[in-house]
Image: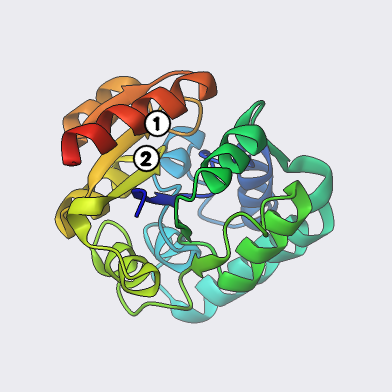
Amino acid sequence: MPTALLFDLDGTLIDSIELIMRSMRHAFDGYAAGAPSEDAWRALIGRPLADSFREFVAHEPEVGRLIGRYREYQLEHHDRLVRPYDGIVAAIQGFAAAGHPMALVTSKADWLAERALVHVGLHAAIPVIVGCDSCTRHKPHPEPVERALALLRAAPADAIFVGDSPHDVESGRAAGVRTIGVTWGAAARDELTRAGADVVIDEVKQLPAAVRRLAAEGG
């Protein structure tokens, strides 16, 4: 069976960084303690939303209120501000045609991740979604990757996880899969390298070759 491919969503398949940052600013607008810096928030992309807010807000009722404001903006502007990265749809369709089993491993809510895949035309190619509703522990813990492997009936040695953040790389490594870090999302090359990515790439067009290389090494 061809190598199983696991993909992060935000910053890997879809360009949603602007939406994430605008939603954060909307949530914290008027908040007495002020908003986190954009760098601080970007560093948390890839973690569940509630965990990110808890980094800056101590009281759970306030966390819930801020998440509500975040979702308000996010859902209103989702389709306008979310697009697939150039070349990614063709790349994923190529993997599907080659028979690679594929799953989405994201810290986004399952239903919202599905909405994004439908919006960009990738829902048929990536039928398995492991979001924050599917797990009790989240990236960088290995549980989301392990659940995706179980659903695909794939062994860690026969899988590759592609993501744009150190959380993705660390989750994949902890689950025993090889990892590809991509620099077109939230994190820089040196962050992905420090996290231990097996390969780091800068352009979508490099993805098929990176997958072939790691698949060959694994085989």
> Which residue is tagged 1?
187
Residue type of the residue flagged with mark 2 = Ser
Q: Earlier in the sequence, mark 1 or mark 2?
A: 2
Between 158 and 121, the one nearer to me in the picture = 158
SS class, disc 1: loop
Q: CA distance from mark 1 to mark 2?
A: 5 Å
Note whether 14 is above or below 75 in the view shown: above
| Percent of width and height locating residue 219 | 18, 41
Identified at 58% across, 65% down, the residue is 127
Identified at 83% across, 58% down, the residue is 76
Circle 1 crowding by C-alpha within 10 Å: few under 14, some 14–19, many from 20: some
Identified at 57% across, 57% down, the residue is 126
Residue type of the residue flagged with mark 1 = Ala
| Percent of width and height locating residue 85 | 64, 31
Note whether 199 is above or below 108 in the view shown: above
Identified at 33% across, 48% down, the residue is 3
Label of residue 148 in the image: none
Q: The N terminus appears in which quarter of the rendering?
A: bottom left
> Which residue is tagged 2?
165
Q: In the image, 197: left or right of 41?
A: left
